[in-house]
Every structure is written in structure tokens, then in C-alpha cells.
Amino acid sequence: MYQFIVNQNVPENEARELVKQMPTYWGDQTSVAAPAYIGIVVFFLAVLALFLEKRNIKYALVAGAIFSILLSYGKNFEPLTSFFIDYVPMYNKFRAVSSIQVILELCLPVLAALGLNAFINSDEENRKKPLLYAGAIVGGFLIVILFAKGIFTFSGANDKFYAQQYGPEVMKVLKEDRETMYAATIFRSLGFFAAAFGILFFYTKKTFSQFTTVVLVGLVMVIDLFVVAKNYVKADDFVSKSQIERPFGEPTEADARILEDTTHFRVFDIDGNMNSARASFYHQSIGGYHAAKPKKIQELFDYQIAKNNIEMLNMLNAKYILQTNKEGIQQALENPNANGNAWFVSKVKVVKSADEEMKALDNLKTKDEATYQEEKFVKGKMVPFKTGKDSLSTIEMISYKPNHLKYVSNNSKNGFGVFSEMYYEKGWIATIDGKETKIFNVNYVLRGLQIPAGKHTIEFKFEPQVVKTGSMISLISTLLMLLTIGLGVFYWRKQNKNLAEIK
């Protein structure tokens, strides 16, 4: 590929960078950062354990490894995957089904260690045949997949996109490179396998001592893993402590200006859209990078913020907007219309569905109006909101912690308050003067409360019941364990005392 690019009159430095960016992966997955590689030496020793290890634990380890592989197939093994998603608690929380391969990555190394231990400590006459059997299986497998490369097309799931980007000639050369890399990888594995097999074979001939054999096999194993790992974990990935503490360098003049403001607000970085990790590092930001954002906030961005609906930024309390000008200088633009942390509204628009609510946001005057889905009302009942407010009505934030928000409201009438915080029903509890009250999901993503007339203290606390239950179970378990240990020590001392008296 490098030579092909250079032949197109591309400078050598640029050619090297282009080669690094070439998509050499040709599997079905749309996004793969690195392989889950356990090493051919580990695999070989694990196979050896099947012939030498006498304990039944080897069957459990093999079963665990196979089971994790089947689960990692995901949609390619639909019945098993669907069963686990539907009936196994928390399984659907995995971002990628391939995460289950950690079980394989535990089972095979343990099995490999058992195999090496059994080989080293077995009788001389019982070593040779298992070694030959394991060698034949692993070596034969590598040779078969080497000569079977003709059955592969070396075309990936994203190749149509790459063909449009790079052109057919580049894709032809890329496929040739993929085939070459495939063969080179198998030859590399054959080399490490042959080295490990040879070391163990020479041990059977008493050429190497037990200590030398273990050290050499371990060294080959580490080199095997290192050769692959260095392709994905490079020296550039290791940075100084100062870079970790300041990953984005020093604050810009725009950042410094915003940081002078000690009130509670948010910042919207137009340049980074909703994915600016830099803005989140210095400020309370709208957005920030996450692979799986809350769906509602993502939809709000896609259907409202992305089409420049400034009212959405107002209700999210975006007091400052970061934007780079034509000269490449980042500026902090103050938004004087930001709604603040919370406010009373004079009207609540009731809609019938999420689609209607999203459309209602198009022209919503968020400082005076709010939206609410009718389907969230108690079935068969209409809950009228009391939306009174006077000219001096306020809701002021007096304390902020991620899991505990505190406000003071003041209104001469019964009113409805909107809070510029993400609505999330699981775990959040709202209280007015210590008395729990219902949190309403308003404006698609925000929280709303019915607030009585007068001056009140309002608090939001994040106290998930599952955490309370888990903490209680943990406490009881710890106390039972300590009690059991205490009783054990008591009876042990009593028994020793009785034995001493008998003597």
C-alpha cells in the first residue's frame, strides 16, 4: 500500500500517515478498536491441559470459554443472545456483546497455567504423548486456516464507504494487503507455537531444567502478547502527569472570562456541538462526550438545538456560548436570555405524545410556558396545574451537588416551577419543606414541580432504592460474617481450653 501511494506522487511522509489510517480490518463489525488477543502460546498450553490436567475444573473452564464465545456472537447466535437479554438481569446493560469475552480471557489463561503445571510435574513417560497430541491439534489448526485463506473475500462491512472515499484501485491494493497480513499473522503464530512446543519438547529430553523451561515458556508467551499489543498501545499513549491533569492545556481567554463568573450556569460549545469534552473539562457544559448519551437529550439536540432554536439553550441555562471566529480565536458570547436554574411559568401546554411535545418546543416561550405529555397523567384523570405567579416570584438555587440540589422559592400564588435539570425518574426524590412531592417531566427533558404559595425550601436528592437495598444487604452480610468469625474464635478458644484441662 505504501509503495502504491508513493507511486501516485504522494510525499513519503504523507504516504506513511495514509497507510496508518487504512482500514485493514475486514470483519463484519462496524467498529473495532483492537482484537481480544490471548496469545497462541496460551491457547497451546490450554489445549495441553485437556490431556494432562486430572481435575474436573478443566471442564468448567472449557465450558466457560465456549459459552462466552457463543454469547459474544450476538445477533449471529440470536436464540442464546435474545434469551439472555430478555431473562438475565442486567445483561442488556452491556454496550457490546463482545464484552463477555472477558470470561474467555480468564478461563484460558487459568487453563494454560494448569496445563504447564501438569506438564512440568507429570511423570516422564506421561509427558510426550499429550505434548504431541496438543501440538498436532494446534499446529494442524494453524496450517488449515493458512491454506484456507482462499475461501475469504477480505472484504469488510464498510468497504463500500471506503471505495467511495479512496477509489477502486486503492481498495484492490488494500485487499491484497489484508491477505498478506492474514498470512503473516498465521506465520507469526506458527513461530511462537513452534518455540513453545520446542521448549517443552527439549524439557522431555532433559535438555532444559524445570526452572529454565518455565522461564522460557513465560518469555515466549509475553513476547507473543507484546508483539500484538504494541500495535494498539503505543509510546504516545503514555503521557506525563501534567498532561493528564491538564489534557486540554491552559484555559483560553474565553475560558478564563467564563471562569470569572461564580454563578451556576452552563456553557454551550458550538464548535464541538454536543461532543465537546474540552468544554466539560472547564465548565458545566451542555453536552460532552459519551458513547451512549441519554436518548432524550440527544433527540433534543438533533431536533431543536441543531436547528438553532435558542429557546432550548435558554431553558438549559446556557449563559455562555463558545464560538471560534474567522481569525481562529475562541470567543465567549454571553446569552442574556438564559432562564437561570429554575423559574415559575404562567402556562403548561398539554400534549398527547412525545412527537407532539417535540413539535411544541419549536415555538415555546420557555420562560413563560412549559409542555407536558398527557399520557403521563393518572389514567382517566386530568391533573390541572396551578400556574399562578406574581411579578416578584423567584426560585433561587442556594446549593449544588451532583446528587443534591437545594432551592428557595418565593411566590404569593400557587405556581408551577420548571427546573433546568435533566428529568430522570429512577432515584431522584423531590421535597418541599421536607415533604416528598411528585416530579413532572416537562419540556421533554426537564423537571417540573407544583409549588404552593409562600416561601419554601425545595430539594432534589438522588437516592436510588437499589443502592439503599444493596447497602443494607452488604451491612447485614458483613455483620453476619463478623459474628460467624467471632463465634468461631470463641469455640476454638473454648475447645483449646478444654483440651488443656484434660491434659
Image (spheres, grey):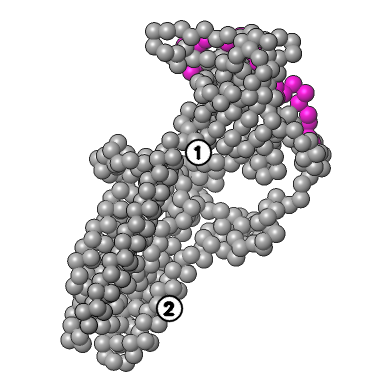
Q: Secondary structure at mark 2?
A: helix
Residue type, mark 2 in image: Leu
Residue range in magenta is 331-355
With 154 as the anchor, is 387 left or right in this view?
Answer: right
Q: Which mark is residue 219?
A: 2
Q: Give the residue furthest to the bottom.
A: 207
In the figure, 358 relative to 25: above or below? above
Q: Which mark is residue 292?
A: 1
Q: Is residue 386 magenta?
A: no
x 25%, y 83%: residue = 121
Give the alpha-carbon distance from disc 1 to disc 2, as whole Å. 40 Å
Q: Nearer the viewer, residue 345 or 498?
A: 498
| Residue 125 coordinates in the image, percent (x, y) | 17, 86
Classify the position of the C terminus by image quarter. bottom left
The answer to whether the residue labelled 1 contacts the one labelled 2, judged by CB atoms less than 8 Å apart, is no
Residue 79: tell me if it is visible.
yes
x 52%, y 21%: residue = 437
With 306 as the anchor, is 156 left or right in this view?
Answer: left
Q: Nearer the viewer, residue 195 or 288?
A: 288
Residue 63, image quadrant: bottom left
Residue type, mark 1 in image: Ala
| Residue 314 coordinates in the image, percent (x, y) | 68, 23
Residue 279, image quadrant: top right
Residue 415, image quadrant: top right
In the figure, 88 relative to 184: above or below? above
Residue 98: tell me if it is visible.
no
Q: Nearer the viewer, residue 203 or 416?
A: 416
